[in-house]
Image (spheres, grey):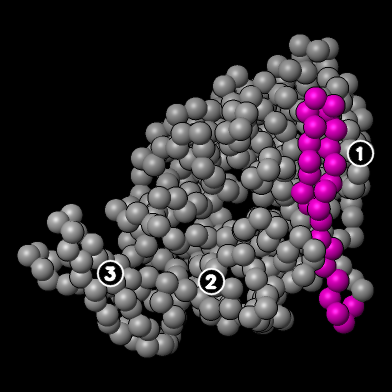
Amino acid sequence: MRSSVAHALRQRLELPVFGLYANYLNSVALSASFRDGSRHDFRASVETGGYSGPAQLYASPSIRMARGPERVPGFDFMMIKNGLSSPVVVDTDGHMRWTGAVLPDSFSSLFSDGMFYIGSQTERVLHRMDVSGAFTSVPVGVSRYTNFHHDLAPGKTGILAEFDAIEGGVARVESTLAAIDTNGAVLKEWDLGRIFSEHMRARGDDPAGFVREGADWFHMNSAIYNAADNSLLVSSRENFVVKLDYDSGAIRWLFGDPLKHWYVNFPSLRALALKLVEGKAPIGQHSLSVTPDGQLLLFNNGLGSLTQPPWAPRGATLTYSTPSRYAIDEKAGTAREVWTYEHEPDHSRTRLYSDICSSVYEGTPGTYLVAYSVALSRTEARLLGVDSNGKVAFDFAYPTTVCDTVFIAQPLGWNDLRLR
């Protein structure tokens, strides 16, 4: 699914050609402009074979609804982070258009500045892969980190990465966030266990019943930087969405289900909670993002806490999952669900339920890519393009084992790329 074309002028110029259709005679047009004002146009035909490899299933989705000419998804390509291979790119017609060198998974991955970055789930190693599929690997420069987990995202500087760690012989399970550069150097770290323990202790709560050493008490699954107010938004699947000051790590607010352990039993945390004034609270949420108008977008899974102490309240569990968008008024301390989408298949009144993994991201304003990672009792992944009125632009399904096929799916812009 990749090839190259070259044109000999005074010296050889070689460019990668990617995103081709498999098993197809592809037409390639290249227009080159030079500093002396000259221009050269070049056309070629590139014939490709069928894809064979670990990402084979992406080549033949079940098309529940094809994209028609009147359906505008708001984006053309989707990057799928998965547990089978390198990142996979498919288009909104369901065609597989790119995958890279064989890697065991791409759960923790990011496309930035013409490069794919993939964090290992078993080692503290960052892979850097270009669009030709070639990759190099670098170690992350903090020895107590053991592996990446969940996602990567653009940071204030570098990349925001989520790590497991061991410190003093004690496992720090999914509660460490760091900013790293593309060579694996650690630029800044946020230890959520320390942040919450210090906050709670200073306000008279004993954190031992909440921050439990060696346990998956937090379960960080998404972390993003918000340049609008120099903050971090972090999803704790077990508890809430938390907003932190980027520089100090101070907790600004918490937003989640008030029926859970954190709200019921700890006044120091309850005092930080946003009040929901309309809609439903985030429950077991994934894939945070901030929309251009400053609203919080996330996938609302609807599954209550899994790893709280046996005596602690686990909160509500819903029977369906939705993308949810919130307007937050920090001065008033309130949150309002301003948009959601509840999918109801034509043949059934049962709404889709995807209790773990999954994602939603906005393409152009008012258009969304929604990934239900584990529908049908964790056997089917679904990709839908929907708009703010609930109109479906396309609907693709793939077989899955838990989150392997689609962990996260994001709109991918391949315009104005700068290739190294």
Task: Point out the stretch of residues depicted in magenta.
Answer: 324-348
Residue 376 in the figure: left or right of residue 34:
right
Location of residue 68 (image quadrant): bottom right
Q: Is residue 317 visible?
A: yes
Q: Earlier in the sequence, mark 3 or mark 2?
A: 3
Distance in Å between CA atoms under marks 2 and 1 = 38 Å
Residue assigned mark 3 = 31
Looking at the image, is 119 positioned above or below residue 38?
above
Q: Are marks 2 and 1 in contact (CB under 8 Å)?
A: no
Residue 90: give its label: 2
Look at the image and say whether residue 338 sits in the magenta stretch: yes
Residue assigned mark 1 = 277
Task: Report x, y in % for residue 340.
Answer: 81, 56
Task: Please report the residue visible at 73 percent of the width from the left and 24 percent of the height from the top.
Answer: 252
Question: Local crowd at mark 3 within 10 Å, few (<14), some, or many (≥20)?
Answer: few
Q: Earlier in the sequence, mark 1 or mark 3?
A: 3
Task: Report x, y in % for residue 63.
Answer: 67, 82
Q: Is residue 105 visible?
A: no
Look at the image and say whether residue 222 sits in the magenta stretch: no
Q: Quadrant of the N terminus?
A: bottom left
Question: Local crowd at mark 1 within 10 Å, few (<14), some, or many (≥20)?
Answer: few
Looking at the image, is 382 positioned above or below residue 117?
below
**SS at circle 1:** strand
Residue 385 in the figure: left or right of residue 59:
right
Q: Earlier in the sequence, mark 2 or mark 1?
A: 2
**SS at circle 2:** strand
Disc 1 residue type (three-letter):
Val
Disc 2 residue type (three-letter):
Val
Distance in Å between CA atoms under marks 3 and 2 = 25 Å
Q: Are marks 3 and 2 in contact (CB under 8 Å)?
A: no
